[in-house]
């Protein structure tokens, strides 16, 4: 039997898990949600959700992964042999596959926008960027080509393995990403809209805090931390015995939240710098509104506009890549370990299968836009079903499994590294896992269902 892979260092493990968490969810989805839900009050609720719900589930996944040293399906099979709990693992890996197939589509857009920024296409005052985006996504060749390039890059990293692929790549890309964010925040502070942007982000207006905003904050926290998809469980199976589960989870959640909030500090000063652009522009905020904003804001120094917009889309691309890698690994680890296939072959199989679904998602903005189910095209269907239905179900089940089914002693031993670390917060943690997280997520789930009907 082949030895199970391991991350080479504790730092590497944290970077890899943070790489999974920091993704399009932080730079694209978070500012959009903040914009739609009224700013600072939403951020406060989001932070609460991270602590009360996100952290406990992340630690639960870490416990399952490190204890079993297995991919998600195998992990549940080992911990609950012959019981129906093993469907949690199957569900997680299935969702990872579905999410990956549409994630590569948006990731392909980030590549195309990076290219467009540096080639000057995004720096033309007369362009209508709504139409620019619409024409691009409706062009089957271009959108498939960029998604395929992105898939290929993900594949190369996965095929190289855990230490020389995933860990090495995260250790290089995460610091790069943090550096770019820092530079962009500095630029944002020199924009005319900085005061209004800061007010929007820092001054809570609780009258805008509707029930739906609270539930959206929960959904966002869940998505952003990459919970319930086997990614963190799989990565935790590569953690060594000395990795501290609680403090690693806190670091990952802190990095993830930091990047999300800083993305807000980049996007909103830019948005408020241009009259007539609304903060609540929705999904188009990053791809349709921002190019326009960069253009106007840097009207007098166009080269700075090139640079700002180019760096912004590289940031999105890097964030997307490390997340896609974790989704890919969640599926590949299963195929590699349980189907006894060499890693490279398993990775190829997963890449080809994902790309086939990815092509359908790409085309759902153009030639296949007529194919709808419940009024949604394939891309929206994949997104809605996975994040609003399957993820919450997986999350609740993971919390119930660790909180109620697993032996309390086993969980304690994992969290305290066999009693060598202090177990001071264990009681609080268990309470969050048993009660708070399942109840909070169930309400999010009901809201998701009501939204869809
Ligand atoms: N957390 C990632 C993001 O913020 C998305 C993701 C979800 C990645 C699930 C892996 C697994 O974009």
Image: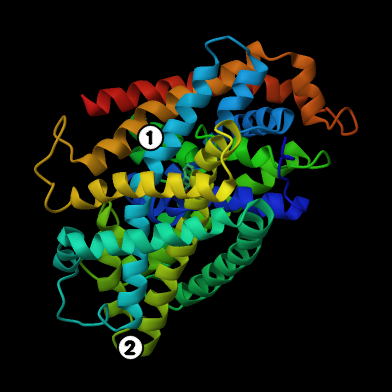
Q: Residue at x 51, y 51 (%)?
A: 325
Q: Does the CB distance between marks 1 and 2 fall below 8 Å?
A: no
Q: Which SS class for mark 2?
A: helix
Q: Residue furthest top?
A: 83
Quarter of the view holding residue 71: top right
Q: Is residue 180 toward the left or the right of residue 14 in the image?
A: left
Q: Is residue 438 visible?
A: no
Residue 326 higher or lower than 277, as above or below: above
Q: Is residue 150 visible?
A: yes
Q: Which SS class for mark 1?
A: helix
* Crowding at mark 2 (Cα within 10 Å: few <14, some 14-19, many 20+): some
Q: Position of residue 300 (x, y in %)?
A: 31, 90
Q: Quadrant of the C terminus?
A: top left
Residue 51 higher or lower than 351, as above or below: above
Q: Is residue 172 toward the left or the right of residue 415 in the image?
A: left
Q: Nearer the viewer, residue 366 or 35?
A: 366
Residue 362 higher or lower than 86, as above or below: below
Mark 1 or mark 2: whose residue is earlier in sequence: 2
* Residue identifier under label 1: 387
* Residue identifier under label 2: 302
Q: Residue furthest left?
A: 370
Q: Is mark 1 within 8 Å of ligand 1?
A: no
């Amino acid at each position: 039997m082949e030895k199970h892979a391991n991350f080479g260092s504790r730092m590497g493990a944290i970077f890899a898990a943070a790489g999974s968490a920091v993704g399009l969810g932080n730079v694209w989805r978070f500012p959009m949600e903040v914009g739609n839900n009224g700013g600072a009050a939403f951020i406060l609720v989001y932070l609460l959700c991270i602590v009360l719900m996100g952290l406990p589930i992340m630690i639960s996944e870490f416990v399952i992964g490190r204890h079993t040293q297995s991919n998600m399906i195998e992990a549940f099979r080992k911990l609950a042999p012959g019981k129906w709990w093993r469907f949690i693992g199957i569900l997680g890996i299935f969702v990872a596959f579905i999410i990956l197939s549409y994630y590569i589509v948006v990731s392909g857009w980030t590549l195309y926008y990076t290219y467009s920024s540096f080639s000057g296409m995004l720096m033309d005052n007369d362009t209508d960027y709504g139409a620019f985006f619409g024409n691009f996504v409706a062009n089957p060749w271009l959108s498939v080509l960029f998604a395929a390039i992105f898939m290929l890059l993900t594949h190369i990293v996965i095929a190289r393995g855990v230490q020389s692929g995933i860990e090495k790549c995260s250790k290089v890309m995460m610091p790069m990403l943090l550096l770019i964010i820092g530079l962009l925040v500095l630029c944002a502070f020199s924009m005319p809209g900085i005061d209004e942007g800061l007010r929007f982000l820092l001054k809570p207006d609780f009258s805008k805090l509707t029930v739906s905003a609270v539930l959206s904050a929960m959904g966002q926290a869940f998505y952003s931390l990459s919970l319930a998809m086997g990614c963190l469980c799989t990565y935790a199976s590569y953690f060594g015995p000395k990795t501290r589960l609680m403090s690693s989870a806190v670091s990952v959640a802190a990095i993830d939240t930091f990047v999300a909030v800083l993305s807000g500090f980049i996007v909103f000063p830019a948005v408020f710098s241009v009259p007539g652009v609304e903060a609540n522009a929705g999904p188009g905020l990053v791809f349709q509104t921002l190019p326009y904003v960069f253009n106007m804001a840097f009207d007098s120094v166009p080269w700075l506009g090139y640079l700002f917009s180019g760096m912004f889309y590289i940031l999105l691309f890097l964030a997307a890549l490390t997340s896609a890698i974790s989704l890919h690994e969640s599926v590949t680890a299963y195929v590699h370990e349980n189907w006894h296939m060499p890693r490279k072959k398993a990775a190829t199989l997963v890449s080809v299968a994902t790309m086939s679904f990815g092509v359908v998602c790409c085309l759902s903005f153009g030639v296949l836009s007529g194919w709808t189910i419940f009024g949604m095209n394939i891309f929206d269907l994949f997104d809605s079903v996975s994040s609003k239905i399957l993820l919450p179900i997986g999350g609740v089940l993971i919390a119930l499994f660790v909180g109620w089914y697993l032996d309390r002693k086993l969980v304690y031993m994992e969290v305290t590294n066999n009693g060598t670390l202090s177990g001071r917060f264990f009681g609080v943690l268990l309470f969050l896992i048993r009660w708070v997280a399942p109840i909070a997520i169930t309400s999010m789930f009901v809201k998701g269902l009501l939204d869809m009907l």
